[in-house]
Amino acid sequence: MPKEIYLVKVGMTMTEGMVSEWYIPDGEQVRKGEMLYALETEKINMDIDAEASGTVKHLVEIGVNLEPGTVVGFVFEEGEDIPSNLSVAPASTAPATIEAEVGPSETVEPQKSQMRKPDDGRIKSSPAARRLAKELGLDYLSVTGTGPGGRIVEADVQAAKDDVPQPVAPQPIRAAAKASPLAKRLAREKGVDINQVIGSGPGGRIVQADIDAAAQKGAAPQTVVPQATDAAPGSIKITGMRKTIARRMFSSLQNSAQLTMDMEADMDDGVKLRESLIEEWKDEGIRPTYTDLVIRAVAKALVRHPLMNSQFGETEITLLPDVHMGIAVALPEGLVVPVVRHADRLSLKEIAVESSRLALAAREGTLGLDDYAEGSFTITALGMYGVDSFTPIINEPQAGILGINRIFDGVNWRGDTPVKCKKMNLSLTWDHRVIDGAPAAEFLVEVRELLANPYRLLV
Amino acid sequence: MADQEFEIVIIGGGPGGYTAAIRAAQLGFSVGLVERAELGGVCLNWGCIPTKSLLHAADLYREIGAAAEFGIEVSSPKINLAKMIERSRQVASQLSKGVQHLMRKNAITVIKGEARFVDKNRVCVEREDTNDAYVVADNFIIATGASAKNLPHIQVDHERIWDARSAMTPSFIPQRLLIIGAGAIGVEFASFYATLGANVTLVEMLPQILPAEDAEIAALARQAFKQQGIEVLTETAIDALRMGKENLVATINGAEKEFNAAILSVGVAGNISSLMLDDIGVETDNGFIVVDPFLQTNIRGIYAIGDVAGVPCLAHKASHEAVIAVEAIAGKRPDELNRLHVPGCTYSHPQVASIGLTEEAASALGSIRVGRFPLIANGKAIAINDADGMVKTIFDHSTGELLGAHLIGSGVTEMIQGFAIAMGLETTEAELIETIFPHPTLSEAIHESVLDAFDRAINF
């Protein structure tokens, strides 16, 4: 009996997916456990392993959107007759979904699949590409990938075979911008936010000329234009992550009554607390961020304001039992929102550890399915780019999202005397269908007070 | 004979041309290289390299003369001029063969002969003893270098009036030597011949010797040469130079003076005359080819690099431009050459090396800080008995940007590259101050000079 190859269902919300690459060509041999195809869904890309050894026959082309559970091919054991026409499923009928096969579990655990591990940084490559590269004596990291998300596929290595390997085009990385000492100093003197500058030096290094240019533009942030290839400017194919973001953001604005308010929080003590905690936890390698303080504050506030931690339904508002905090993480190709689970039950230190794990995993592309699941509220930070206020869009079906802005030198009045103090704007977007302005403001006040009196975050 | 076709053809096999050929081969182009004489060009065969052998011989001779200072007694050393020259020729020949090997290794077709353009995609190579060859290519890189200029009233005759090539293969050491032009080449020959015992008169039209260098450094060099017995005349022209009864007779400031030989080193002009550039419309200016920042001429697909593309006429500038031009052809978007980051070296005694802006040029642009550290305060320089010299550094007063470095003294031609790296990385004084310099080295003078610019020098 040939074994069916299913389009694996990952996550309860998966409605469609595609085979984005067959690692084993039609008619070739596969061994059990070897990577068989690449699954691409709206949320995730993953490699699916073969469950049996034998000859692989494809039923679907790559790039066709299908329902999860669809039979996409077969593995024929040695000696089995391979029918010439495979459009009709032989013998067994494929189950409608995989859930049927695995019983009550709603989601197929990805044990049979393998999350992509970055080989080096975020360069993804197929095993076949790596093998071919090894055979050809090519450094596969130097090959430019044309697969999904820039993944290096076998064809790329073939193409590179007769070519001299080219280093992957340097991309400016905002978070860890390399800059010359002179550029850093000039940026400080001219008040240019160096994180907003795109470097033109070797390897994307920010050099003097870049700062001068930025200063001339009045430090107007330059936009990173996603670079497809040098040869084909003008259009970028909307795939996986971009498509999901586009659909979800648009849907959120269409389907809820969201609005945003800003409130200023005193951060003098928060800044001091963070600095002392950085020092205290240094030996353990834990470095709390402002976002971590806010996660802790919001988690505490959500427990007292359950409507903010709810979902609006057709007939009722469901108050969610758990506080699972989504954290927006920017990636070169878009953004993902991994979740700090049970954030209300975690200490600040535990939050710092978990959020840094999630951020790293997000950047390396190694987030697991659990890391995405069941967020009940979201926090999104743009403060590192000098943003003072914005209107975050709710991550459906949640009821609220809090935007974290830049920390700046503000003023408090002690009598008639202005006193300099650290401030931060909190930008709260909430769903007016769920909560009215006054209770939303009460929630935000609570967050503000927690941040202004951060000892309360430690208890 | 059928045309030979290549993707890139390079005309001239000097440090610019052969580097371009190798880089082009690395990028997968089919490459032809046309050379009329020896691979390696003037630099390797008749310039930088053989003169370094000669100048080292002079250094050695001088040091042997001073050996008694170190407790080594030597009976008076004797100069074997023929042997000295033979060694310099052997070094040049060894390196030229090395370039031949590199051409073979990179599968570059070398065509011997003199190139002239037929049209913008075709070059005729006139060869000795055989038919002309025609070479067709999508891209040409002109790297023909430059040749010494004559003066209207003074022409090189190779007998008594020498160009650099004759001066590095002399049949005798002139007792009295006139050197016309005190740029790097004139100064190096002045140093060489003075060390070997010649009475040298060094004449320069401009107010300072080494006119490209910082005025303070040039003045220190002049002082050192004067102490070595070199007569230095600036703002002076040679009114006439004729062959007398036995010797050359020069008219200087109205007075006649006899010399056994003269060296003419009054600058260079691009080697463009035989290329027939006018026929294809390549723009030239004052003997040099006009190029854009990526070394392309006004004719698409025709590039020019190195001396023929303009000053500074330095081998390392040529080889750097070679890579830029080839990568531009390959569509790789190279960075432009930053002329302020091209270091210059003169291998006289004392040596002179510099990079970036002179004090005069920098102060014209804005407020600066200048640091100076004399080698007399450097332990290593004293230990090796070579403590005449100075490291001078120039910083932007407000940003701390390193704008220039000017060095004179022992070993400075090897030290300048530290500043080249620092400037390339856009270093400010802060990083240089934080850098740990090994002790005892001459390079500690770099550190002290930077410290001095910020009033923090320790050892002076």
Image (cartoon, rainbow, N blue to C red):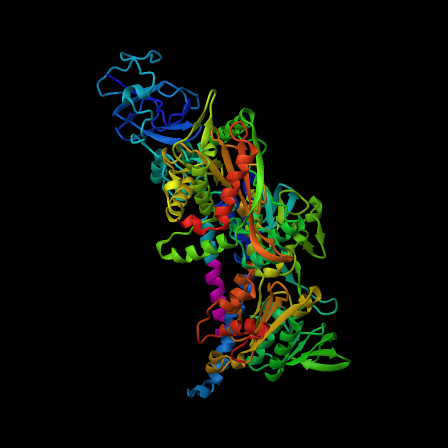
For the C terminus of chain B, the quadrant is bottom right
Q: Is residue B75 above or below residue B122?
A: below
* Residue nearest the viewer, comparing B158 with B24: B24
Residue at (36, 12) in percent of width and height: A87
* Residue nearest the viewer, comparing B164 with A272: A272
For the N terminus of chain B, the quadrant is top right
Prevailing secondary structure of the magenta residues: helix
Q: Is residue B192 visible?
A: no
Coordinates of residue A336 in the picture (x, y in percent): 46, 36
Coordinates of residue A248 in the picture (x, y in percent): 50, 28
* Residue nearest the viewer, comparing B408 with B188: B408
Q: Quadrant of residue B299?
A: top right
Q: Looking at this rendering, what residue extends furthest in the left direction?
A: A79
Q: Is residue B241 above or below residue A85?
A: below
Coordinates of residue A251 in the picture (x, y in percent): 53, 26
Q: Is residue B430 visible?
A: yes
Q: Please give the count of numbered marks on the rendered protein.
A: 0
Coordinates of residue B290 in the picture (x, y in percent): 68, 51
Q: Quadrant of residue A409?
A: bottom right
| Drawn side of residue B265 relative to residue A238, left or right | right
The span picked out in magenta is B83-97
Residue at (60, 76) in percent of width and height: B190
Asked whether B90 falls inside the magenta stretch, the response is yes
| Drawn side of residue A359 relative to residue B40, left or right | left
| Drawn side of residue A344 relative to residue A94, left or right | right
Q: Looking at this rendering, what residue extends furthest in the right direction?
A: B254
Q: Is residue A70 above or below residue A263?
A: above
Asked whether A445 falls inside the magenta stretch, the response is no
* Residue nearest the viewer, comparing B316 with A180: A180
